[in-house]
Image (cartoon, grey):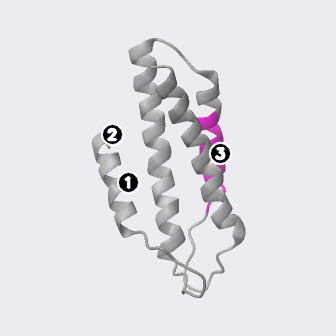
Amino acid sequence: MSLDELIANLESLIGQMEYVKDGDFVFARHPNLFVDWLEDAITVCKELYERFKTKTGTTLPNVEEWLSMAERRHGFTRKVKFGDIVLTKDHNLIIDIMKPLELALREMEENL
């Protein structure tokens, strides 16, 4: 997939997400959309880093570590199905993956 297609897919997945508040039913699609979104977000960040390296001729060790960290953490995510209990760790992993992606993007922006 091209970068534009990946970004369009991210936007589509965000458009399908719903806010779930206390007392609402959590359906399998709710956490599964995040798992899918994160996979594409990691791919987008890696592609942006490749473009950054090509443009600047510089590597950023912190960015490489944060992208690797996000990718490793994504390996612990799981798709849930009807009847599965959505655990606290399922939610926390989402945040634990987003944070290094945020740090990587900020570092690349600061070094442009």
Between the residue at mark 1 and the residue at mark 2, the CA separation in whole angstroms equals: 10 Å
Lower sequence index among marks 1 and 3: 1
| Relative height, residue 51 to residue 44 (above, below) | above
Q: In which quarter of the image is residue 60?
A: top right
Label 3, secondary structure: give it: helix
Read off the residue under disc 3: 72
Lower sequence index among marks 3 and 2:
2
Left or right of 22? Residue 50 is: left
The image shows residue 52, relative to residue 39, as above or below, that is above
Q: Which mark's residue is nearer the viewer, 1 or 3?
A: 1
Q: In this view, does 19 lie above or below 12?
A: below
Q: Mark 1 and mark 3: span between their CA atoms? A: 20 Å
When the figure is inspected, residue 62 is found, relative to residue 97, above or below; the finding is above
| 70 horizontally vs 33: left or right | right
Of the 4 image quadrants, the one containing the C terminus is top left
The picture places residue 65, in percent across and down from the top left corner, at 65, 31
Residue at the (55%, 41%) spot, across then down:
102
User: Pointer 1: what residue?
Assistant: 10
Amino acid type of the residue tagged 2 in the rendering: Leu
Q: Which residue position holds label 2?
A: 3
Magenta range: 66-77
C-alpha separation, residue under disc 3 versus residue under disc 2: 22 Å
The answer to whether residue 22 is left or right of residue 105 is right
Magenta-colored stretch includes residue 74: yes
Crowding at dot 3, Cα within 10 Å, few <14 / some 14-19 / many 20+, comes out as few
Query: Which residue occupies the foreground of this view, 77 or 101?
Result: 101
Between discs 1 and 2, the one toward the N terminus: 2
Could you say which quadrant of the image residue 23 lies in? bottom right
**Left or right of 71 on screen, residue 42:** left
Which type of secondary structure does the marked residue at label 2 adopt? helix
